[in-house]
Image (cartoon, rainbow, N blue to C red):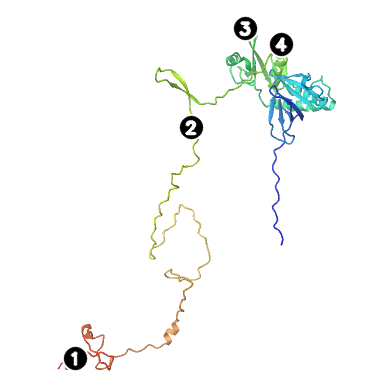
Amino acid sequence: MASALSPPRVPKHKGALPSHYYESFLEKKGPHDQDYKKFWAGLQGCTLYFYNSNRDSQHVEKLVLGASVKFTHEVPWESSGDPGIYFGLFLRNQLIKFKVESLESREMWKGFILTVVELRVPSNLTLLPGHLYMMAEALAKEEARRALELPSCFLKVSRLDAQLLLERYPDCGNLLLRPSGDGGDDVSVTTLQTFNGTSVVRHYKVKREGPKYVIDVEEPFSCASLDSVVNYFVSHTNNALVPFLLEEDYEKVLGHVEADKENGESVWVASSTPAAPSPGPTLALGGPKKLPPLPITPVASQDRSPPLLNQDENYMIPFGDNPAANYMNGDVPPPSRLVPKPRTLAEVQAKPLKPPVAPKPGEACGVCTPRWAASAATWDPRSKVPHAWSDAGQS
């Protein structure tokens, strides 16, 4: 007996692996980590993504590089005798430590990180010509990517609002990009620095000339994107200017202002979160309710015509074969009942009709005799025919 064929196995869909400028295994230790943890890391844009495996498409951690980075090559004291190669990365006054397997891998990571942050291929690293070519390709991709997006420190605010933001949130940065007051595609750069205890605010103009941005200073400098404009101000001030990044805080508890009934003062009251409504109606106790009985519609008699179909509704009436028999009254006998064969007209005409029988003389006709007379008749024991009373018999 042949076995049934099993359906073909459909391979599971796997997410496409992300494209990185550079990727390899990398061990990372943050400021709050107890030990190094090994990841598969990839650099895309100005962000380092960390994966559990090189076959994963979803990252588990990420690290935003920012507008400036600083490296250190100090070997940690707890790693004495470890053949691994170490390097550190300062980001936002925090030290992130990394460990790689070779000196070449360390130089590659440093070279690609500096390329995307400073938008230039570094020349002070021990790299091969092939490595420099790979970084030049990554630089072209990063410049094209940044040309299509705005930097995080670009805010659509006015000149006065930009100054107030920098004064109110000094820990979020001191350099902000905004649209120019002249309109068009030009932008403005607002900076704030403290000199001898006094806040000094400066505004710079950046003109848009075709695909380039030209910084309007004593020696005009041309940039390919707004990110290049930000990097120019950061690098030419020895990292004294930091791009503004406002960290938004969101509340977790809903509240409202309510007046105190005793003293009339306004107080803040935390609202209680109502329970989520159920997806469907709640059934009453004792089980579901029984539906009322359907009304019985009387059957229409045969002399009534059937109701017409509603023209507003779409009905489909199938066309089939003609019925095998036509019934006048619509009563179809059940199949178990035998139906007598009808006689033909020739059989009825072939049988002669019986002549009417005339009553015998002296016999009373039951038709002509009244009912009271027939009831008073007497029976002769020798005959089955009743004899009516007559006038002669009474005499």
**Distance between the Cα atoms at labels 4 and 2?**
63 Å
Residue at image mark 2: 274
Q: Counting residues from the N terminus, which is met first, the one under dot 4 or under dot 3?
A: 3
Residue at image mark 3: 198
Q: Counting residues from the N terminus, which is met first, the one under dot 1 or under dot 2?
A: 2
Residue at image mark 4: 218
Question: Which is in the foreground here, disc 4 or disc 1?
Answer: 1
Say what amino acid the circle numbered 1 marks: Ser
What residue is shown at x 51% (from left), y 26% (from top)?
254
The image shows residue 14 at horizontal and vertical percentages of: 70, 40
Question: Which is in the foreground here, disc 2 or disc 3?
Answer: 2
Q: Counting residues from the N terminus, which is met first, the one under dot 4 or under dot 1?
A: 4
Say what amino acid the circle numbered 2 marks: Pro
With 382 as the anchor, is 188 left or right in this view?
Answer: right
Query: Badge 3 local density, few (<14 within 10 Å), some, or many (20+)?
Result: few
Q: Counting residues from the N terminus, which is met first, the one under dot 2 or under dot 3?
A: 3
* Labels 3 and 1 touching (C-beta < 8 A): no
The image shows residue 57 at horizontal and vertical percentages of: 70, 35
* Labels 4 and 1 touching (C-beta < 8 A): no
